[in-house]
Amino acid sequence: MENNQNQQIVPPVIDHKKADKNKEEYVTLLVDNIPYRVDFEPFFINDQVRYYLTINAGPKDVFVWDKALIRFRAIDDRARTLPVALEIAISAELRYQNLKYFWKTRPQSQK
């Protein structure tokens, strides 16, 4: 029998898309062979980016950057029910979105 505790959780992110209606952004994630549609919308508080997320058309969650964990994590009451592997996959996607935003908004002289 294999020891699954030592396996690293790798967030498999697939199918990056942008929805046409309402300019809503979403991604499709496949985590532990379960597909998830994650709709997200960034917002700012005190110059810190945060995200409203909806997973599979469920209630909205709020994700923020956690310096101690070095990843985005859910902070609302429902956060306890999210699978850890899904939260890690969402964090990886939000980091990717932040990088895309950074490169898109840099001044031309820095590109």
Image: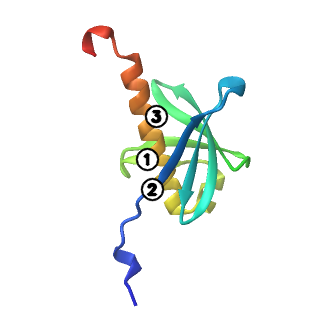
Q: Amino acid at mark 2?
A: Pro
Residue under label 3 = 97
Mark 3 Cα shell of 10 Å, populated few (<14), some (14-19), many (≥20) = few
Q: Amino acid at mark 3?
A: Gln
Which residue is pictured at 31% across the width and 9% down the height?
A: 108
Residue topped by disc 2: 11
Q: CA distance from mark 1 to mark 3?
A: 9 Å
Q: Please say which color scheme the image uses.
A: rainbow
State the SS at label 1: helix
Residue at 52 percent across and 34 percent down: it is 50
Report whether 110 appears left or right of 26: left
In primary-sequence order, the first of circles 3 and 2 is: 2
**99 to 78, vertically: above or below:** above
Q: Which residue is mark 1?
A: 92
Q: Is residue 37 above or below residue 102?
A: below
Question: Which residue is the extreme one toward the bottom?
Answer: 1
